Amino acid sequence: MNAKYAFQGALVAAGVGFAAWAATAQGNTTWADVEPILDANCTRCHGSSHPTGLDLRSYASVLAGSNRGAVVVADDADNSLLVRKIRGQAGALMPRGGPALSDADIATIVAWVTAGMPE
Ligand code: HEC
């Protein structure tokens, strides 16, 4: 193997390593992990008749957002309104009236958004 191919091989190996690390860091979090958290804490208000239209009962309705726009931005948890709300960083903390979600539940939702909201 000449030097050029050895270098390319090293780049490929580094890329594969990074992808594997990223997958582990996100824990392959999917909608199946997020749905029970929203069901238990959010859907009693965010159902079919919420004032801002934000229905948190299904994958499609979460991605559809409210009548003010999207609440989750793929790979950008810090700018996702849903994440900002459960962290208390954007007006009223959600779930409204508290108590706040557990750190583990918040981490699950952040991991899901960071992973690009996989179904
Ligand atoms: C007790 C009722 C109630 C519960 C439970 C609740 N919410 Fe809300 N939520 C509201 C109300 C009312 C608003 C609109 C007023 C406001 O923004 O504070 C709102 C607004 C929001 C918004 C902003 C929507 C927009 O664009 O206008 C987000 C995002 C949100 N809630 C997420 C959540 C999440 C996630 C949960 C569960 C962890 C949750 N909420 C639980 C009542 C609730």
Image: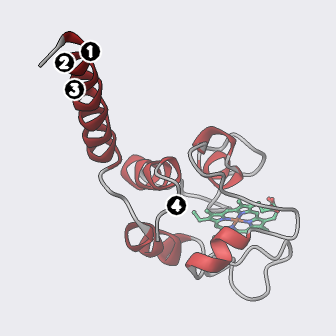
Q: Residue furthest top?
A: 3
Q: Residue at x 39, y 73 (%)?
A: 32
Residue in the foreground of this view, choosing between 4 and 7: 4
Query: Do labels 1 and 2 touch, CB within 8 Å?
Result: yes
Q: Nearer the viewer, mark 2 or mark 4?
A: 2
The disc at residue 4 is 1
Q: Which residue is mark 4?
A: 117
Under mark 1, the amino acid is Lys
Label 3: element kind: helix
Marks 3 and 2 in Cβ contact (< 8 Å): yes
| Residue at numbered disc 2 | 6
At x 22% / y 30%, what residue is drawn? 13
Colour scheme used in the picture?
secondary structure
Q: Secondary structure at mark 2?
A: helix
Contact, mark 2 vs mark 4 (Cβ under 8 Å): no
Residue that badge 3 annotates: 9
- Quadrant of the image where one finds ligand 1: bottom right
Amino acid type, mark 2: Ala
Q: CA distance from mark 3 to mark 4?
A: 32 Å
